[in-house]
Image: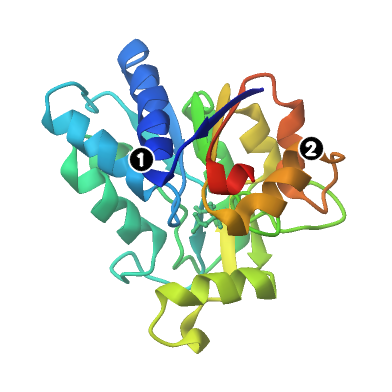
Amino acid sequence: MRIFIMEDYAAMSRKAAELMAAQILLHPDSVLGLATGSTPVGLYRCLVERFKAGELDFSGVKSVNLDEYLGLPAENSQSYRYFMNRNLFQHVNINMANTHVPDGLTADPEAECVRYDELIRRMGGIDMQLLGIGSNGHIGFNEPADSFPVGAHCVDLAESTIRANARFFPESGQVPRQALTMGIGQIMQARRVLILASGREKKAAVRRAFWGPVTPEVPASILQLHPDLTLVMDRAAAG
Ligand code: F6R
């Protein structure tokens, strides 16, 4: 595991963008596993800047997002599809047909999970998976549990996650209570994993995930077993 401790959020974002840009430059046809939330916003901003400066080409890149709320259409400003379009896709030359997010409006969540697993398999797996970490140690929407789920699945979000995400919604009652997420197995099969953590509210989760026992009670802890893991965090998260 490689660890970079950066001064602040801006430096963390620049470092992460450097690592992701290197992946794209070395392998222009990379399959990127992408994340939403507050943590990667700065990284996406840096990637867009580098694209606009003519340093990056996304035309061969394919992407699969980690997760999506169940019940939100792509046009809803809180959906993860909307987030990706706004923060990255619409600013770079990625082919939108090559960007994938689970379908939050599916009438059959189980079938959608099977489709998503199959899609990732057909794409040849993920070359670099980007992750944030929840303050309860979740990755994607894999919440603390008794076991590590392997494939994509539908989850009931933990109360702490619903509370944390309420900041993005006009009313807390509007936060969806279910989501579709990639499984831990898919994340672990990614050839490289890049996880970011920023802010002191992530300090305890980082400590438990990377300096504690590997347990499904802290889903991110399984990443200790990944052969190519990079953790980039700011000083506040490192504590
Ligand atoms: C987002 C995701 C989540 C977030 C995590 C941290 O696609 O899968 O696991 O990475 O909840 O969220 P932020 O970055 O908002 O603190």
**Residue 93 seen from this side:** no
Quarter of the image with the N terminus in it: top right
Q: Amino acid at mark 1?
A: Leu
Q: Is mark 2 within 8 Å of ligand 1?
A: no
Pick whichever, 224 or 9, lies toward us: 9
Asked if 173 appears above or below 206 in the picture, the reply is below
Pick whichever, 13 or 237, lies toward us: 237
Q: Amino acid at mark 2?
A: Trp
**Residue 4 seen from this side:** yes
10 Å neighbourhood of mark 1: few (<14), some, or many (≥20)? many
| Kind of element beneath mark 2 | helix
Q: How far from the left and from the top, in percent, is residue 105?
A: 44, 68
Judged left or right of residue 12, residue 165 is right
| Kind of element beneath mark 1 | helix
Q: How far from the left and from the top, in percent, is residue 111?
A: 58, 56
Judged left or right of residue 110, residue 40 is left
Judged left or right of residue 184, residue 237 is left
Residue where numbered disc 1 is placed? 43
Q: Residue at x 50, y 85 (%)?
A: 172
Q: How far from the left and from the top, in percent, is residue 236?
A: 56, 48
Q: Residue at x 53, y 53 (%)?
A: 199
Judged left or right of residue 135, residue 224 is right
**Color encoding of the figure:** rainbow
Residue where numbered disc 2 is placed? 211
Q: How far from the left and from the top, in percent, is residue 27?
A: 37, 14
Disc 1 versus disc 2: distance between alpha carbons?
Answer: 25 Å
Q: Residue furthest top?
A: 26
